[in-house]
Amino acid sequence: MRWRENLLEKIGALATAVLLALYVQSQLHPVIERSYEVPIELLNAPPNYEVRLEGAPRARVIVRGVREVVEQTRAEQIRASVDLSRAKPGENRLAIRLDYPAEWREQLTLTPERPVARVSLEPRLSRQFPVRVNLTGVPDLQEVLAEAVPEPSSVRITGAASQVRRVRTVQLNFDMTGLQGDLDLELAPTPVDERSEPVMGVQIAPAEVRLKVRLIPQPTSKTVPVSPRLDDLPPFPYRVIWFSVEPVTVQLRGSPARLAQINVVETAPISLRNKTSDAEMRVPLKPPPGVEILGVREVTVRVRIQRDTQPEPSRPKPPADAEPQPAPKEGDA
């Protein structure tokens, strides 16, 4: 047959033509790739469970196809999702599903860089916590008492049971530095653990609390009496019959709220265990926590000690029914 003549040459020519066609096609319509970052949606989450997506919350999607088509795509047209309908408590490895326009299916290839997402399910817990206000700094006004009232006074913390159980208190921090008057503002409270570290990944309701800060004029110093602390008394039969302290009072400085709780300042413990005579001592003061003693650091304590006299032994009384004895007459031998 004549078509078999020069068969090798014909096959070579055909291959060359195909390669040339592919080359021309690749030059006119090159194949390219483009990547998009798409948020991962969690679908069909079970009720009363907290869902946590481990790792990055976005999926990297590779779009491959002819340049003219790829360049017309947008990230908003791609949807990445994970179906949680069959997820179990604990960690799950679930496939990432991609959804995109139907006309892309014949022209483009879409591939997620990581086909599987790690998702953890944990029972949800909700607890009510009081809001504690933590005031720091010093306002511009002197001799004032700062009062801060949160509204509402408590918030509800909801989230994964392990995270909610870490919460020890809910704090509302406010710096009063430079404050010149009353103030109302909205602040976001912070749940903290036993180390005062913020607990992340929980929801707070309400998300913000109104804080009312009031500056109330108050004295920041107070005069209180000094009380000697006599611990060990003199040995028997000696006893303390009188003592005095000089100065009688001292002046304290501190916050008005703390000063209101203090009515006396004690000295350090005084031992009279070996004292058998009057004594005079310089004794340091013991400042109460949270306040400062102005000026004086020691006081003079004077003690008067006396020996008790031994009482005379008492004579026994005659019985009530005994007859009285007559008094002896003069001259009786």
Image: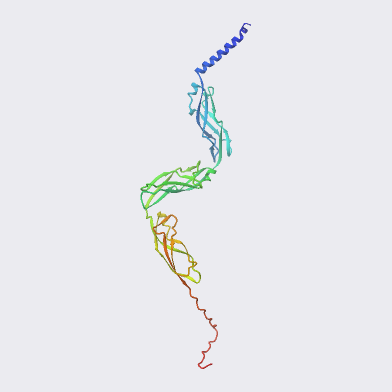
**Residue 23 shows up from this direction:** yes
Which residue is farthest bottom?
A: 331
Seen in the image, is 47 located left or right of residue 139? right
Q: Which quarter shows the C terminus?
A: bottom right
Residue at 53% x, 15% y: name it: 21
For this rendering, which residue is in front, 295 or 97?
295
Which residue is farthest top?
A: 2
**297, above or below 146, in the image:** below
Q: Which quarter shows the N terminus?
A: top right
At which x and y percent is residue 67?
49, 21
**37, above or below 159, in the image:** above
For this rendering, which residue is in front, 37 or 222?
222
Residue at 39% x, 62% y: name it: 249
**Residue 161 shows up from this direction:** no
Residue at 52% x, 18% y: name it: 26
Seen in the image, is 16 located left or right of residue 240? right
**132, above or below 75, in the image:** below
For this rendering, which residue is in front, 268 or 96?
268
At which x and y percent is residue 115?
56, 30
Query: How many labels were placed on the picture?
Result: 0
**Which color scheme does this rendered protein use?**
rainbow
At which x and y percent is residue 187?
43, 44
At which x and y percent is residue 104?
52, 24
